Image (cartoon, rainbow, N blue to C red):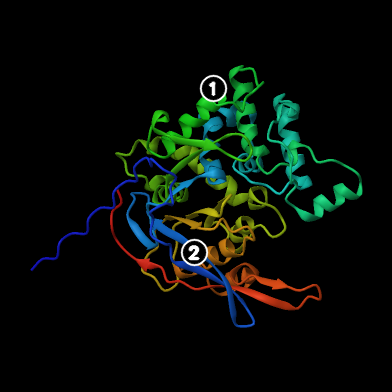
Amino acid sequence: MTAPASPAIPRARRPTRPSGRGRSVPPVLVRQVRNGIEESVHRGDIVEVDAAGRLIHQLGDPNRLVTLRSTVKPFGALAVIEAGGIAAFDLEPAEIAILASSHSGEDLHVRTLQGLYRRTGVSQAHLACGAEGMPLDALTAARLARDGEKPGPIRHMCSGQHTVSLLLSRLKGWDPTDYWKPSHPSQIAYRATVARAFGTTPAKLQTAIDGCGLETYAFPLHEVARAYAMLADPTAIPAGDRRSELAEGLLRVRDAMLAKPEMVGGRHDRLDTSLMKAVPNRLVSKAGMEALRGLAILRGPRNGTHTDGPSGMAIKIEDGDGYDRGTWAASVEALRQAGVLDGGALRELARYHRPVTLDPHGRAAAEAIPEFELAPVGELIG
């Protein structure tokens, strides 16, 4: 008797109430343990797919609706590339990478953006991303405070994303004033590019306001993973999929992020940068607020698996993970189980894999321990 085919997972419908109500409880991914006592847990969902949308691994709900937040940035950067910005502005890899970044506000990030502004005639005075809580880099923040210097918007982690709109405005002759408003031509272009990258239309996008004042967009978790699978290898996008038209631009963004990982995050305790440096030219990592991470896994052999094709993975921690420990531990462990990280890379990433909380005297007081098992599957989504 032939077993019935597994049903396709339906696409998430537009919710009529805030997502989360009525959902099943996500599985525990990470446990916070202090001297053998479980103090708290971080629950969440993980999904890995290929560029055609076929499930490779999952744990929890692949249809979990999430706002992209900063995970949208590699795809939003396509807006200026598709408009001819690379040739018009002679964009270098470091500059493309910072357009897709959530940088730490270090001097190297500021210098890169200021150099771009000088060359293109863009004024950083137009930046409207704010500066509250910035820079992310603690050493830079301490130096600025010591010197009595107030950080400006250019040190905001989203200033690269905002620069996309300023470059588009310069290229197209649009007034950059109020570039951040949804009705501005640069935001309309950005929105259209994101819609193309996610296989939909601008009218069908579900939007919200991000922390930096720009729009963000909501998609099921498996669609986030699929977008990152396309970023991993744009040539693997099925020929009949109109997103294949974005392949050249996606390659530019991917290769820039691979070449300049310190521009994507920063030099100190930024997991995105550390992951990409631990396995060079194998992985693109991009985090978003509220504990979402997209991972583009390039083609290559995987430890303990029979898979070597490109894929995308999306990880969402249920509680938003204000301490980063749940996101760090779950991301490294998921990549280990997917066969992407082992040996020296895992040793290099040990502080993220099982993050330790220290007391004021430097003693280990608690540890975040990843504890889950990714289920291998082969079901087509959507």
Tell which of 59 and 73 is nearer to you.
59
User: Residue 48, position in %: x, y?
Assistant: 41, 58
Check disc 2 and give the amino acid type. Arg
Residue 83 visible to the viewer: no
Give the residue at mark 2.
Answer: 43
Along the polypeptide, which appears first: circle 2 or circle 1?
Answer: 2
Give the residue at the far bottom of this rendering. Answer: 36
Location of the N terminus (image quadrant): bottom left
44 to 103, vertically: above or below: below
Q: Residue at x 68, y 38 (%)?
A: 159
In the image, 151: left or right of 104?
right
Q: Position of residue 138 (x, y in %)?
A: 78, 55
- What residue is disc 1 on? 183
| Spot occupied by residue 259 in the image (x, y as percentages of width and height) | 61, 50
Question: Residue 135, relative to residue 153: is it above or below?
Answer: below
Q: Is residue 96 visible?
A: yes
- What element does badge 1 sit on? loop
SS at mark 2 in the image: strand
**Circle 2/circle 1 CB separation < 8 Å:** no
* Image position of 129 with respect to 23: above or below: above
Marks 2, 1: nearer the viewer: 2
Q: Residues within 10 Å of mark 2 (few under 14, many from 20)?
A: many
Q: Left or right: 303 with respect to 265?
A: left
Q: Which dot marks residue 157?
A: none
Would you place residue 161 above or below residue 369 in this image?
above
